[in-house]
Amino acid sequence: MAGLGGPQFDVKEATNHLRAVDPVLARLIDEHGPYEVVPREDPYHALLRAILFQQLAGAAANAIQKRFHALYGDRPPTPQELLDTSDEDLRAAGLSRQKMGYMRDLAMHVLEGTLDLEHIRELDDAEVTKQIIAVKGLGEWSAHMFLMFHLGRPDVLPVGDLGVRNGMKVAYGLEESPTPKQALQIGAKWAPYRSVGSWYMWRAVTAGRPTTPDI
């Protein structure tokens, strides 16, 4: 299952809109250059990785992922391969019982078609979110990142992401990071290109150096 590609909208049109409605974003666009999203890896593997990396420091997660992939010839497993792997082998790779359960639930959803990654591009944002959050261990944040970076959807505002809210604090000179409700209000004017506005909030808080969230 291949990655699903980059933006599914006119980036120039989105940039022009954001410049017109928000002088703060106009400044960020000038400072950080054009919106760029690199096409991500296979969506199933990305969701599997998102579960593995939850609540782990990068070095520890990378070490576990290396042992996990070694079970399958140094690659991520297919859904069926994962379901066929014993608890003992997964525990030896460093996976907790909870993460094993989450990963197997993801594999079952894919195999049964209740998470239909083959046809997910045809679904609207609400249905994509519904299918992803039905998987144990995946929530709204994971769904928002998937919509933005795998489906290239234009109008996603991930207010549950602290980086976006911290970016708003920096960009708008706020005393503290806004609440999710306040972040929705700040980003309302960006519609229908809130994904692009959110990307510039990450740029604001990281001075353009680190990458956007990984899923």
Image: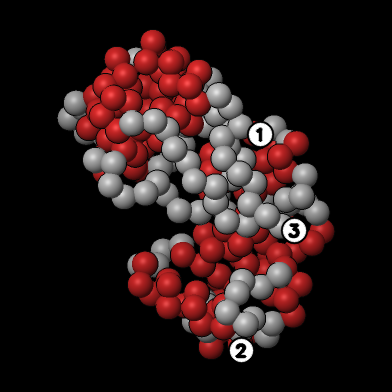
Residue drawn at (57%, 83%) of the image: 70
Ranked by sequence position, the earlier of labels 1 and 3 is 3
Q: Is residue 126 visible?
A: yes
Residue type beneath disc 3: Val
Can you identify the residue that label 2 sits on?
Answer: 88
Secondary structure under the numbered disc 2 in the rendered image: helix
Residue type beneath disc 2: Glu
The image shows residue 55 at horizontal and vertical percentages of 41, 64
Secondary structure under the numbered disc 3 in the rendered image: helix
**Cβ atoms under marks 3 and 2 closer than 8 Å:** no
Q: Examine the rendered structure and indicate whether residue 68 appears above or below residue 153.
A: below
Residue drawn at (29%, 41%) of the image: 208
Residue drawn at (50%, 18%) of the image: 13
Q: Is residue 49 left or right of residue 29?
A: right
Query: Closer to the observer: label 3 or label 2?
Result: 3
The image shows residue 52 at horizontal and vertical percentages of 51, 67
Q: Examine the rendered structure and indicate whether residue 105 appears above or below residue 22.
A: below
Ranked by sequence position, the earlier of labels 1 and 2 is 2
Q: CA distance from mark 3 to mark 2?
A: 23 Å
Q: Nearer the viewer, residue 159 or 211?
A: 211
The image shows residue 110 at horizontal and vertical percentages of 75, 58
Q: Examine the rendered structure and indicate whether residue 134 appears above or below residue 121.
A: below
Residue drawn at (39%, 30%) of the image: 34
Can you identify the residue that label 1 sits on?
Answer: 126
Q: CA distance from mark 1 to mark 3?
A: 18 Å
* Callout 1 crowding tier (Cα within 10 Å): few <14, some 14–19, many ≥20: few
The image shows residue 95 at horizontal and vertical percentages of 52, 77
Can you identify the residue that label 3 sits on?
Answer: 110
Q: Quadrant of residue 200?
A: top left
Q: CA distance from mark 1 to mark 2?
A: 37 Å
Residue type beneath disc 1: Ala
